[in-house]
Image: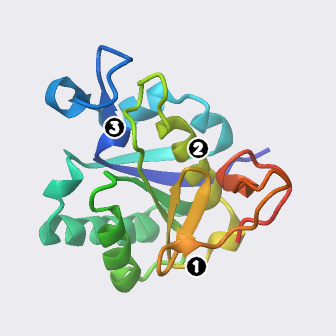
Amino acid sequence: MKKTRIAFISTGGTLAFIESDRLQAIDYSKRGVMLKAREILNEIPEAGDIVDIDVYDEGPLMSSAISFPILRRLALLCERICREQAGTSGIVIGHGTSTLEETAHFLNLSLKVDVPVVIVGSQRPLIALSSDAGMNLIGAFRVAACPQARGQGVLVVLNEEIHSRPLRSRIERGPTGRACARAGSGTGTRVL
């Protein structure tokens, strides 16, 4: 079966950080290293089982370093991907959480693309023992590949929840009361 093609743009942030001490989930930005998009995906090979992924880098940056010129370049890159990469069904943007909402708002106002655009971040670094990065990224790829995500504006996926304009949860809850659908476990309910 042919997999959906998704573009993954990494801007950096906690999602992209690795630290030699897997128990370090606080001071990682002082000693850690930020990975590029391909390196992030190498740490989460399961993503390639779900979708085919084209990688792009717009960083690596801490989200506090995201400025208007970077936001503009990011918007232009999304539009170029949609224009030049036939068959791209969605875009996932890895981003730091400090300015993730501002980026989502800017892109929601400025992008003119007809594929889902999903922004994803994490609260803990990529290879920390308690990292949320892997499942957040998997959830973002699942949402970007979902036809029902089209026309919903720029979406944010964090902690098994999908947020849309104005960044509020728009998914149904599963039997456990936790957000599910394709953002999390993939069990049983609609995405949007």
Q: Name the residue under label 1.
A: 152
In the depicted view, which residue is nearer to us: 178 or 83? 178
Is 175 drawn above or below residue 1 in the view shown?
A: below
Marks 1 and 2, Cα distance to the nearest angstrom?
Answer: 19 Å
Q: Label 1 neighbourhood size at 10 Å, few (<14), some (14-19), many (20+)?
A: some
Q: Of callouts 3 and 2, which one flags the residue occurring earlier in the amino acid sequence?
A: 3
Mark pair 3, 2: CA separation: 14 Å
- Picture coordinates of residue 84 (x, y %)? 42, 65
Q: Of marks 1 and 2, which one's residue comes earlier in the chain? A: 2
Q: Nearer the viewer, residue 172 or 190?
A: 172
* Image location of residue 116, percent across then percent down: 55, 69
According to the picture, the residue beneath numbered tag 3 turns out to be 16
Q: Is disc 2 placed on a helix, strand or loop?
A: helix
Quadrant assignment, res 147: bottom right
Decide: is 62 above or below 24: below
Amino acid type at mark 3: Ala
Counting from the top left corner in percent of width and height, residue 122 is at: 42, 45
In the picture, the quarter occupied by the C terminus is bottom right
Toward the top, the furthest residue is 21
Tag 1 secondary structure: loop
Q: In this view, does 65 lie to the left or right of 98?
A: left
Residue in view at x 29 percent, y 21 percent: 19
Residue marked by disc 2:
138
Crowdedness near tag 3: few (<14), some (14–19) or many (≥20) residues, C-alpha within 10 Å: many
